[in-house]
């Protein structure tokens, strides 16, 4: 009876030692848990600083906050690929998304103070997607200052199309005022 008990203790100890070896081995390192990924995302967001306010020349992600302003809104709806999934197709799409975001940022800077540019991620804000009745990604919607939809395009979004439509709707970028000449 005593030898059976000792045998079970040895077996449990061997299993525990094996699991410990697997856990610390870099070859068998587990994928990051959800909480670890959330902590990494939080660290990245903290490093970026506070989110941009709509209309201040930066791309924001909050359509509801942009609607509170009395500015026309260019809302660009995307469906992001998560980079941590990996694979060549995901990495290519993630690089395309970064390039698209830079184009949106340039549009926001060009129309600073005249238009709020909002990038709405279907993953992060599904309620905004449903409210706007977007079914195909990417999509772009231009709202007037009164929140009425003025133009909608579903499919690949070209910045030139948006600029032409903004000009046709008489929504032009505000000219940047040059600094005043020093008085003598």
Image (cartoon, rainbow, N blue to C red):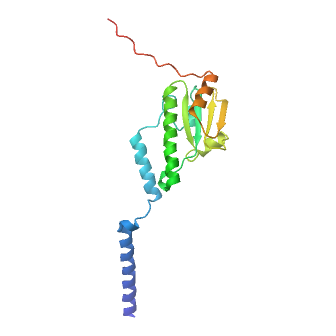
Q: Judge left or right: residue 100 versus residue 183.
A: right
Question: Outermost residue, bottom direction?
Answer: 1
Q: Position of residue 109 (x, y in %)?
A: 48, 28
Q: Nearer the viewer, residue 38 or 142?
A: 142
**Above or below for 30 versus 99:** below
Question: What quarter of the picture does the C terminus occupy?
Answer: top left
Q: Judge left or right: residue 104 versus residue 4.
A: right
Q: Position of residue 68 (x, y in %)?
A: 57, 30
Q: Which image quarter: residue 142?
A: top right
Question: Outermost residue, left direction?
Answer: 184
Q: Nearer the viewer, residue 183 or 14?
A: 183
Residue at the image position 55 percent from the left and 35 percent from the top: 118
Question: Outermost residue, top direction?
Answer: 184
**Above or below for 144 versus 16:** above
Residue at the image position 40 percent from the left and 79 percent from the top: 15
Q: Judge left or right: residue 153 versus residue 10.
A: right
Tell me if I can see residue 67 in this picture. no
Q: Nearer the viewer, residue 69 or 113?
A: 113
Q: Judge left or right: residue 53 versus residue 8.
A: right
Q: Position of residue 136 (x, y in %)?
A: 65, 44
Residue at the image position 38 percent from the left and 68 percent from the top: 23
Q: Position of residue 107 (x, y in %)?
A: 52, 30
Tell me if I can see residue 115 in this picture. yes
Question: What quarter of the picture does the N terminus occupy?
Answer: bottom left
Q: Which image quarter: residue 157?
A: top right
């Amino acid at each position: 009876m005593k030898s059976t008990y000792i045998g079970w203790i040895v077996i449990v100890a061997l299993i525990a030692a094996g699991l410990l070896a697997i856990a610390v081995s870099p070859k068998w390192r587990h994928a990051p848990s959800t909480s670890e990924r959330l902590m990494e995302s939080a660290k990245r967001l903290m490093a970026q600083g506070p989110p941009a306010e709509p209309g201040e020349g930066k791309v924001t992600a909050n359509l509801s906050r942009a609607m509170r302003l009395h500015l026309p809104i260019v809302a660009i709806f995307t469906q992001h690929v998560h980079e941590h999934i990996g694979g060549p197709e995901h990495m290519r799409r993630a690089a395309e998304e970064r390039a698209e975001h830079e184009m949106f940022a340039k549009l926001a800077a060009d129309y600073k103070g005249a238009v709020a540019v909002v990038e709405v991620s279907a993953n992060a804000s599904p309620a905004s997607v449903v409210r706007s009745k977007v079914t195909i990604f990417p999509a772009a919607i231009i709202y007037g200052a009164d929140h009425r939809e003025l133009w909608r395009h579903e499919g690949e979004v070209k910045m030139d199309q948006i600029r032409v439509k903004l000009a046709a709707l008489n929504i032009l970028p505000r000219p940047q005022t040059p600094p005043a000449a020093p008085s003598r």
